Amino acid sequence: MLERTLGIVKPDGIRRGLIGEILKRIEDSGLRVVALKMKQLTRSEAEGFYYVHREKPFFNDLVDFMTSGPVALFVLEGENAIERYRRLMGATDPKKAEKGTIRSDLAESMQCNTVHGSDGPDTARFEISYFFAATEIVKR
Ligand code: CDP
Ligand code: MG
């Protein structure tokens, strides 16, 4: 199925200059970048984005981290893009992520795990429209 998914290079990835490395891995995998921008998230933007986690013990620290510097936001498109990009990222905890995945190779910790990716079709729709207007997404 042709899908779109939302990806983020998180503040730790931006600080370490990893935008190019991450987009290279994504492009090499055959996924197409159809939208891309930099943004400094406000607290309320980060809280709204991670709304499903609002009751979790890590929520406040996660919002602190996601607003600690700019992020790179992008939309990917391709056959089964959601699952393919999740596999490219690896497990949430970089210590448990498979070798060769972005998180295993590049991430620092469970919190500073360098990248975000939508986890299903409903989440992808919500997350893409949270950050991108339809007019910011290209055909390619
Ligand atoms: O990002 P992913 O979908 O793999 O994981 P999540 O369970 O949706 O959690 C969202 C984000 O919260 C993670 O990517 C981590 O940055 C952070 N997190 C954390 O700091 N501590 C945890 N125990 C779980 C998640
Ligand atoms: Mg998630």
Image: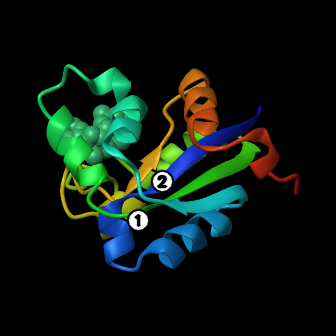
Taking the spot 66% from the left edge, 67% from the top edge, the residue there is 27
Q: Nearer the viewer, mark 2 or mark 1?
A: 2
**Camera-side residue of 24 and 14:** 14
In the picture, measured across the screen, residue 25 lies left or right of residue 55, that is right
Is 77 above or below relative to 9?
above
The residue positioned 26% from the left and 59% from the top of the image is 68
Name the residue that disc number 1 marks.
Answer: 100
> Residue drawn 39% across and 71% down?
14
- Asked whether the residues under the numbered discs 2 and 1 touch, taking CB atoms below 8 Å apart as contact, a structural biologist would say no
The C terminus: image quadrant: bottom right
Secondary structure at badge 2 equals: strand
* Amino acid type at mark 2: Ile
Give x and y (percent) for residue 22.
50, 69
Image: 114 above or below 42: below
Residue 28's spot in the image, x, y percent? Answer: 65, 69
Secondary element at tag 1:
loop
Q: Position of residue 92 (x, y in %)?
A: 30, 44
Whether ligand 1 has any atom under 8 Å from the Cβ at mark 2 is answered as no
- Inspect this view and state whether residue 61 appears: yes
The disc placed on residue 90 is none
Residue for badge 2: 8
